[in-house]
Amino acid sequence: MESLFTPWRLAYLTGEAGRLANGCLFCELHRLPDAEGLIVHRGELVYAVLNRFPYSSGHLMVTPYAHRGTLAEMTAGERAELMEVAAAAEIVLVEEYRCHGLNVGLNLGRSAGAGVPEHAHLHVVPRWEGDTSFMTVVGGTRTLPEGLADTHRRVAAGFARQRALRPEGSA
């Protein structure tokens, strides 16, 4: 029998990934340098960050800088920018990964599946036709063909290209 080693998942499985000295993951992440925090875009009110434990390569999240647990708690400006950045993420991920579709969604509250229920974040997950493999179905394991540093470089460059194409003042 062959073994697939995924040592990066240990922090996730043991809960180490969610333990922070000062509280909320999303309140702390944006204070880190982009490469360290896996931040691919910084807007005025929201930022986009790669998921450190992705479902697929390119899996990112868009979240407000402010600590908001729900859409209703966000300002109108935060909600608007959240969707503008999600639209830019759609373009970036389709261009960079040639994905056939995307899952885009919010899990509001722990019972809805939120891993960080106190700080709302929108997931943008690239999908490909036939991307469900025996590894996911039988082994409960996902295979990622690219390291996070490479994903960060590609997606951040894609967001930079999008910014260059957008008029001044837009996300």
Image (cartoon, rainbow, N blue to C red):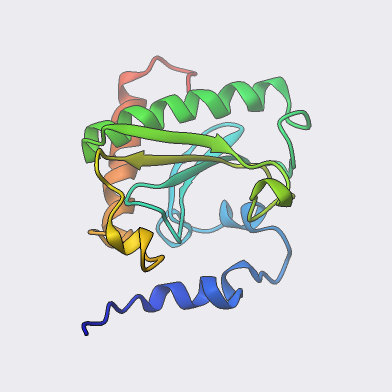
List the single residue furthest toward the front: 138
In the picture as drawn, the residue positioned furthest to the top comes out as 167
The residue sitting at 48% across, 58% down in the picture is 37
Residue 160 visible at all: no
Write the residue at 64% across / 50% down: 113
The front one of 158 and 114 is 114
Residue 47 pos. (x, y %): 53, 40
In which quadrant of the rendered view does residue 38 lie? bottom left
Q: Look at the picture and state if 109 lies above or below 8.
A: above
Instruction: Using residue 120 as the reference point, say whether residue 59 is left or right of it.
Output: left
Quarter of the figure with the N terminus: bottom left
Query: Residue 67, can we see it?
Result: yes
| x then y, percent, for residue 48 | 49, 42
Q: Residue at 36% across / 65% down in the picture?
A: 138
Q: Position of residue 126 (x, y in %)?
A: 35, 40
Q: Residue at x 71, y 31 (%)?
A: 71
Answer left or right for 118 relative to 57.
right
- Of residue 61 and residue 102, the one placed in the foreground of this image is 102
Q: Position of residue 158 (x, y in %)?
A: 29, 36
